Image (cartoon, grey):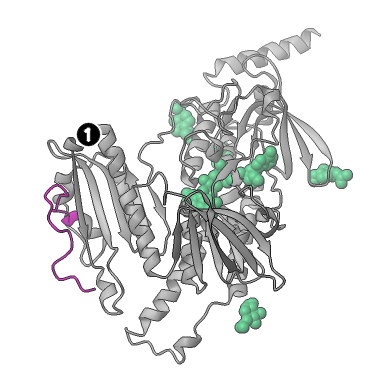
Amino acid sequence: MIVLNLVKSSLLVACRSATNQYRHNITSNLRLTTVRLFSSNGESYEYDLVVIGGGSGGLACAKEAVQFGAKVAVLDFVKPTPLGTKWGLGGTCVNVGCIPKKLMHQASLLGEAIHDSQAYGWEIEKPENVKINWTKLTESVQNHIKSVNWVTRVDLRDKKVEYINGLGYFKDPHNVHVVLKNKTERTLNTKYVVIACGGRPNYPDIPGAVEFGITSDDIFSLEREPGKTLVVGAGYIGLECAGFLKGIGYDVSVLVRSIILRGFDQQMAELVKASMAEKGVEFQVGAKPLSVEKQDNGKLLVKWAFNDNPSDVKQDVVDTILFAIGRHALVEDMQLDRAGIKVINGKIDVDVNSKTNVDNIYAVGDVLYKKPELTPVAINAGRIIARHLFNNSKEVMDYEDVATTVFSPLEYGSVGLSEENAISRHGEDNIEVYHAYYKPTEFFVPQRSVRYCYLKAVALREGDQKILGMHFLGPAAGEIIQGFAAALKSGITMKILKNTVGIHPTVAEEFTRLLITKRSGVDPTPATCCS
Ligand SMILES: Cc1cc2nc3c(=O)[nH]c(=O)nc-3n(C[C@H](O)[C@H](O)[C@H](O)COP(=O)(O)OP(=O)(O)OC[C@H]3O[C@@H](n4cnc5c(N)ncnc54)[C@H](O)[C@@H]3O)c2cc1C
Ligand SMILES: *[C@@H]1O[C@H](CO)[C@@H](O)[C@H](O)[C@H]1NC(C)=O
Ligand SMILES: *[C@@H]1O[C@H](CO)[C@@H](O)[C@H](O)[C@H]1NC(C)=O
Ligand SMILES: *[C@@H]1O[C@H](CO)[C@@H](O)[C@H](O)[C@H]1NC(C)=O
Ligand SMILES: *[C@@H]1O[C@H](CO)[C@@H](O)[C@H](O)[C@H]1NC(C)=O
């Protein structure tokens, strides 16, 4: 008894003497045991951290946390879609988001390139026979995803993060219950929990939607060709799906309730829409879907109402209807009330340290209330949580000026404020907007339309004119805006931009040549415009 107490107290001393019990790279089992047996309040837990959700945010957090010696488990479980689509470890971005989307966008750009190549001298025997093999495309995309799933699993094993393929829910703030894939159950007792459950697409509450419709969760692995497709919703996911489907050769229409790309700069949004319409995507604005019926020939009869007028009904017959009307966070299965976690509009709010209203529970990624739903945002915030919990870090996640790109065939990249937000924050008199239409050199030869190649910088009017927002519509917009995002974070002004020598001939150099202000009323179209 005396000996045991002695061991115990000396362990406690050892533990307390470290400014932070996780701070050092703890390699010996003894020290690891010390950490787990005597955490700050003297209670002991089976795990230091349980992460619910193995997507962008959860995995980043878990992998960072083990570096500091924490014992970590990650739960990940994917419920199949109504159509039956399911996928592996890694979350939305890898399986049904960024990655397959970018690959299909690329497939669509390559189609345009094949077309353009003839003007550059490539001889294509029967250009009219050039077409996509959907089966081959989805196979290639899915093979890449499976390799990423596999690498992710190996990485977790190497880093000693325990991966549990099961659905988790709270019993109380320190106990997470898991229903494993084989229906066995276990409870994980843990000091901290990070909620990283992400979200899934919504279906409208209309007849036939769930039965006959699909979402972005299904499109990237759809076994049949999509064919003529109706996309419902004009957020970035709807537009991107519409864009690549059109680009690879299918008839596409988009039903828009009211606004295109809500939350984005609306002048740019209208240009994105116009650039897509020019490529043949049809837009039905003011349309609200009413019903989906399956006809005897297997095609879908879709009806929608115009301008909330139930007697103004239009219809179309399509092969596929894809709903992209918004997403909800996966909070419903988690029994958050048992842990006392508050939910606002179906999401979870956190403080600057990403902590929920419950002391030992944190949250990250798409589940968060009023935060950008983007992979790098989730990853950065996830890592910062781990450093905060296990390395005493004071760093906080900066959600300001996060750059993003819409991969509509002609890409729209932006960072910072939209023109309307800059005006509402600073007043129209205090804002200067520089803008221009431009002509990518490589567009001339194949006589591609340059009508929507446009960019603008939104700046303060006074002094050196600090830049508040940058917007670019054109090829490789994501690649271009990424660098300017770092410049904007560093406080770039119009003076600096004008003093920057461009790289010629590129499209990114157009930012260094911005001279015309909107206020001047001068036509921003280049004099020698070609189309
Ligand atoms: C079509 C599409 C395109 C996108 N394109 C881009 C893009 O180009 N760039 C970009 O930055 N972002 C993009 N995104 C957004 C990006 O995918 C998300 O922001 C990101 O995946 C959020 O990460 P997360 O960790 O919050 O959740 P997720 O990555 O969604 O991961 C959450 C995981 O937790 C699992 N889970 C949920 N509840 C439980 C539970 N109770 N128990 C166990 N497991 C659970 C889920 O099944 C899922 O696997 C796109 C999204 C979509 C849908
Ligand atoms: C921790 O220490 C081990 C053994 O010295 C080493 O292999 C490992 O790279 C270290 N990890 C970190 C994150 O420093
Ligand atoms: C399309 O690709 C699949 C998978 O690679 C292949 O089996 C099929 O024969 C291809 N179809 C055509 C028409 O070439
Ligand atoms: C269920 O799976 C877990 C984890 O793979 C395993 O430990 C357990 O033995 C399995 N139970 C049954 C009944 O198969
Ligand atoms: C952990 O904290 C130490 C001390 O502040 C710091 O030097 C180190 O860079 C941190 N490690 C990581 C991976 O952030």
Instruction: Evaluate whether residue 108 shows in this view.
Output: yes
| Residue sticking out furthest to the front | 311
Quadrant in which the C terminus appears:
bottom left
Residue 41 point in image, percent of width and height: 64, 14
Residue 97 in the magenta stretch? The answer is no
Indicate the quadrant where residue 395 lies. Answer: top left
Q: Please tell me how crowded label 1 is: few (under 14), some (14-19), or many (20+) other residues with Cα within 10 Å.
A: few
Q: Using the image as rendered, state which of residue 221 and residue 234 is in the foreground.
A: 234
Quick check: 497 above or below 442?
A: above
Q: Secondary structure at mark 1?
A: loop
Q: Main secondary structure of the magenta part?
A: loop
Residue position for label 1: 427
Residue 516 in the magenta stretch? The answer is yes
Q: Residue at x 46, y 58 (%)?
A: 239
- The stretch of residues the image draws in magenta is 512-531
In the picture, measured across the screen, residue 274 lies left or right of residue 281, that is left
Q: Residue at x 66, y 16 (%)?
A: 11
Q: Using the image as rendered, state which of residue 148 and residue 3 is in the foreground.
A: 148
Q: Amino acid at mark 1?
A: Gly
Indicate the quadrant where residue 271 lies. Answer: bottom left
Quick check: 19 above or below 151?
A: above
Q: Residue at x 55, y 57 (%)?
A: 304
Quadrant in which the N terminus appears:
top right
